[in-house]
Image (cartoon, rainbow, N blue to C red):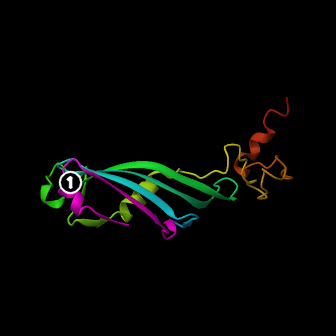
Amino acid sequence: MKVNVAQLRRTEGGSEEYQFSENFPPLQLGNEEYIYQKPLKVVINVINTGKSLLARGWVQSLLGVNCSRCLKEISFPLDFEFEDEWLPLELISQDDEESVFIFEKDEFSIDERILEHILLNLPMRFMCSEECKGLCPHCGADLNTNPCVCSNEIIDPRLEILSKWNKGV
């Protein structure tokens, strides 16, 4: 996704809206790969503040993920807003380097920045529902659909001696 701000840079106080709908490659996070189930829709309104370009945007899509408790495939909705400040390279001071984004030409790609915003808006764990019971740690049965037939008497061998404690009383 490329944003051309040549006209906007000449108009202090002006704004321009950009809309994109693109198929992004799968999102790779460690060993996990998440597939976009819908094209990524991005709407950005860029305002020339005189010193910088203020970009306010919105991202929407569906991401195919697995529930971290029961491993069922689910669709996670991506729907969030973001805001970035962009400064041309010639106006950068040392104080600005860490708080704003730099662009050199009148046209620049925002793909990396959109990906960063997506990563910042992902939860630590994906869940199909708050009530998800997950999988049995012993037999692997989905506790949401089938009751587990495992014995609840399985005891950690390191703590087995404690099971005999206080039985003689």
Q: Which residue is mark 1?
A: 97
Q: Residue at x 79, y 58 (%)?
A: 139
38 vs 27, nearest the viewer: 38
Provide residue 8's location: percent of width, then percent of height.
23, 57
Q: Is residue 92 left or right of residue 25?
A: left
Q: Does the magenta run of residues contain 17? A: yes
**Quarter of the image containing the C terminus?**
top right
Q: Which residue is at the far top?
A: 169
Q: Is residue 154 left or right of residue 94?
A: right
Q: Residue at x 57, y 53 (%)?
A: 77
Magenta range:
1-29
**Quarter of the image containing the N terminus?**
bottom left
Q: How many marks?
A: 1
Q: Which residue is at the far bottom?
A: 25
Provide residue 33's location: percent of width, then percent of height.
55, 67
Q: Is residue 167 left or right of residue 98?
A: right
Q: Which image quadrant is residue 16 in?
A: bottom left
151 vs 4, nearest the viewer: 4
Q: Is residue 85 left or right of residue 166?
A: left
Q: Which image quadrant is residue 130 in?
A: top right
Provide residue 107's location: percent of width, then percent of height.
26, 67
Q: Residues within 10 Å of mark 1 (few under 14, many from 20)?
A: few
Mark 1: which secondary structure?
loop
Q: Amino acid at mark 1?
A: Glu
Provide residue 158's location: percent of width, then percent of height.
70, 49
35 vs 69, nearest the viewer: 35
Q: Residue at x 62, y 57 (%)?
A: 75
Q: Does the magenta run of residues contain 118? A: no
